[in-house]
Image (cartoon, rainbow, N blue to C red):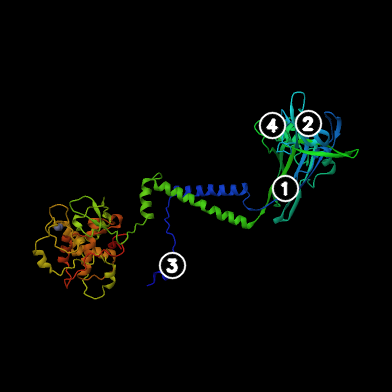
Amino acid sequence: MSCTLLNLCEYDTKKLVKIKSVKLGSLKWTLNGLILMFIFFMMLWNKEYQEYDLVVSSVTTKVKGVTKISIPDSGEVVWDVVDYSGPSPGKNSFFVGTNVIVTKNQKQGNCPEVPSHEKLCQTDKDCEKGFSDQYSHGIQTGACVKMDILRKTCEVTTWCPIENKKNPRPALLASAENFTVMIKNNVRFPAFDYIRRNILPEMKDTELKGCIYNQYKNPYCPIFRLGDIVSEAKENFSEMAVEGGVIGIQINWDCDLNHFSYSCLPKYSFRRMDKKESNQTLFPGFNFRTAKYSTVNGVEQRTLLKMYGIRFDVMVFGKAGKFSIVQLIIYIGSTLSYYALTTVFLDWLIGTGCYSKEAKQTYTERKFEVIQDREECFLCVSFVDEDKLRVVKKSRKKRLQETKPLSFHQRKNDLAGMKTLMSVLQCGQSRSEPVQNGQSGGLIDEDLPRRQRSGQSTDTPLLEASQSGCPAWCQCGCCRPSDILQEQLCCRSEKGHCITSSPLFSTLVVSRSVLETALLYVDPLAELQEGAQLRHGAYAQFIRWRFGDSTPRDAIPVIPSCCIWRIRAEYPSPDGQYSGLRLNQAVPSQPEFNR
Ligand code: ZN
Ligand code: ZN
């Protein structure tokens, strides 16, 4: 038989154990209900029933505001957006100058270098012609010239005079905090083909023109006061204005495009992007240089501006969600495994005995069907001089009588069954003897325990064997030798009287009327025959008496040699052949005589 091919035509399903318990049942439904509520809550909370798309956006900005500033050496000038915006800092950003160093009327020529890194000189020898490095303002001419009354520096060819000022405090354009910026943000969610902008369609022109963004009062106005932006980023504008910096304006779109719960509004938040402590950062703030060129009398001049200011980076995040049956099914599918928690918890509750000790016992016995591998064959031994049943592992080297027990178990007597049997016996003494000599016993034969389908493989005739001396392992004096180790078992563990000498043995095990009643008790219409059937019935009766109605760990009960031979003497096989103890069959869950 091809194993692999047959396996393809098989389906395995789990065996379940149903425990009828109000407590466990209600606990199960309570837990399942809680899990269902949790799943439902999480579905609504995270909108798990939606499919999502990320935002695609564009941003344009327009700054407005004018201020009057007082520049050293130039006096007061009015600056508008062209003056303080500088060159465009790039996509989604705008710059507002807040402080400036102006160096006017620079011309190409020679002038003393500014001593930025201790580059003072004494004589021309200290200066190298043509030298320049990353700190130089120009190219050295090789001369050492006076910079001021005390100091001399190397002369350089460059734009003269060289810029030599520190950034002013307070910032010259500190009033830039009153400037406003309008941010126009168009967003699109391609998956849903949905377009929206931060100037909401419900806003009126008049409303829009006068408004200024305020987190609480006017959260959807797209016009922002710079001072508000900086203070919402938890910064001080006038301090930040001195060195400059970078502020991030985040626009977050969290859109729900369902008809029943539509919402799609921008949410603004602000934070400083660069490190704010100027004394902790080596090069703090943000600045750049720019120049205005002019020609005076044919000579080119320039006004150099070192601009400090705040760069505002507009960042747009967002996603839009819309109900999707596919997403809902996927979500429901992904949550099904949570219900296993109920099983895990209840199994744990029962398994640890926290619920009830009895339930644990019953449950474990019913839920786990212990099946031994052929190699792991367990036998059950009941000695008449011992209170408990022994479970032993089948040994290949030791005889059963001497094999050490794995465990001891309390005998579970089938007293009720025995009582019924006895009462049937007492009442049914008058029934006729069911002796039939037909050949129709095949069916019944199948029902009988195979492994007890008789004894030893020896061909020794019964009478001769009874006269021979008993083997060394026998403690009762009635056993017979056998070559099979598992058959070398006495009814006793220590020397004493044999169990077959007990009057109960004669009544319960070998009495013809009891055996017939017992067999008919199992199969009321059985046609009882001589020999094999009664012999097997006697084995079954002995097992029921001495082992109870089930053996621990499904071990196979073994009948001692003395008892086997006593039963065989009573109901012998006509040809003197007995099949003996059979262990190589699948282990039954209960002794077969109970069927
Ligand atoms: Zn014996
Ligand atoms: Zn014995």
**Mark 3 residue element:** loop
Q: Report the Cα–Cα distance between label 1 and label 4.
A: 57 Å
Picture quadrant of ligand 2: bottom left
Q: Quadrant of residue 448?
A: bottom left
| Mark earlier in primary sequence (2, 1) | 2
Q: Which of the 4 quarters of the picture holds residue 90?
A: top right
The residue that label 4 is drawn on is: 117
Residue 229 in view: yes
Marks 1 and 4 close (CB-CB < 8 Å):
no
**Label 4 – label 3 distance at C-alpha:** 88 Å
Which of these two is toward me, 587 or 222? Answer: 222
Q: Earlier in the sequence, mark 3 or mark 2?
A: 3
Instruction: Give the residue at mark 3.
Output: 10
Q: Which residue is mark 2?
A: 174
Name which of mark 1 and mark 4 comes first in the sequence. 4
In terms of secondary structure, where does tag 2 sit?
Answer: helix
Binning the other alpha carbons within 10 Å of mark 3 as few (below 14), some (14 to 19) or many (20 upward) gives few
Residue 532 located left or right of residue 222: left
Q: Picture coordinates of residue 481 (x, y %)?
A: 14, 63
Q: Residue at x 39, y 46 (%)?
A: 352
Which mark's residue is nearer the viewer, 3 or 2? 2
Closer mark to the observer between disc 1 and disc 4: 4
**From this viewpoint, is residue 22 visible?**
no
Query: Which numbered disc flags the more N-terminal residue, 4 or 2?
Result: 4
Which residue matches tag 1?
264
Badge 1 amino acid: Cys
Mark pair 2, 1: CA separation: 36 Å
Label 3 vs label 2: CA separation?
A: 84 Å
Count of marks, rendered view: 4
Viewer-side label of 2, 1? 2
Q: Are marks 1 and 3 in contact (CB under 8 Å)?
A: no
